[in-house]
Image (cartoon, rainbow, N blue to C red):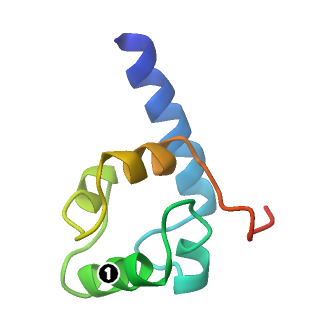
Amino acid sequence: MKKILLSLLIGFTSLLASIDFQNAPKEKLMCIKGIGEKKAEAIIEYRKTNPIKNMQDLDNVKGIGPALMANITGNVLSKRCSQ
């Protein structure tokens, strides 16, 4: 269990270095596998009234569930984005 949590923390930390969920434009948010236009817009709408300070804040965004959170913490980027 500790190894899993450590892996998630490391993955999330590296992702935050490349994607700032509080300020990223829609196109950058859409680089995450599983985030399309509608989910990117949901994140943008959410952050207008709720700051995104950590991963737990993303749980409150409509349409973001466990599978997408795994992509976020695992730094899984879409093929359409080059990084």
Closest to the observer, 16 or 63: 63
SS at circle 1: helix
Q: Quadrant of residue 31?
A: bottom right
Residue under the image location 60 percent in, 55 percent down: 17
Residue, disc 1: 42
Left or right side of 1 for 13: right
Q: Residue at x 41, y 53 (%)?
A: 68
| Residue 47 higher or lower than 59, as above or below | below
Local crowd at mark 1 within 10 Å, few (<14), some, or many (≥20)? some
Taking the image as shown, residue 82 lies to the left or right of residue 50, namely right
Q: Quadrant of the N terminus?
A: top left
Q: Is residue 9 left or right of residue 56?
A: right
28 in relation to 54, above or below? below
Visible in this render: residue 25? no
Residue 81 position (above or below residue 6) = below
Badge 1 amino acid = Ala
Q: Is residue 10 among what the camera can see?
A: yes
Please state, as top left, top right, bottom left or bottom right, where the C terminus lies in the image.
Answer: bottom right
Query: Outermost residue, right direction?
Result: 82
Measuring from the top left, give residue 62's x and y in whole percent: 22, 71
Residue at 46% x, 79% y is 23
Residue 77 is drawn in which quadrant?
bottom right
Question: At 53% from the left edge and 73% from the top edge, which residue is drawn?
Answer: 29
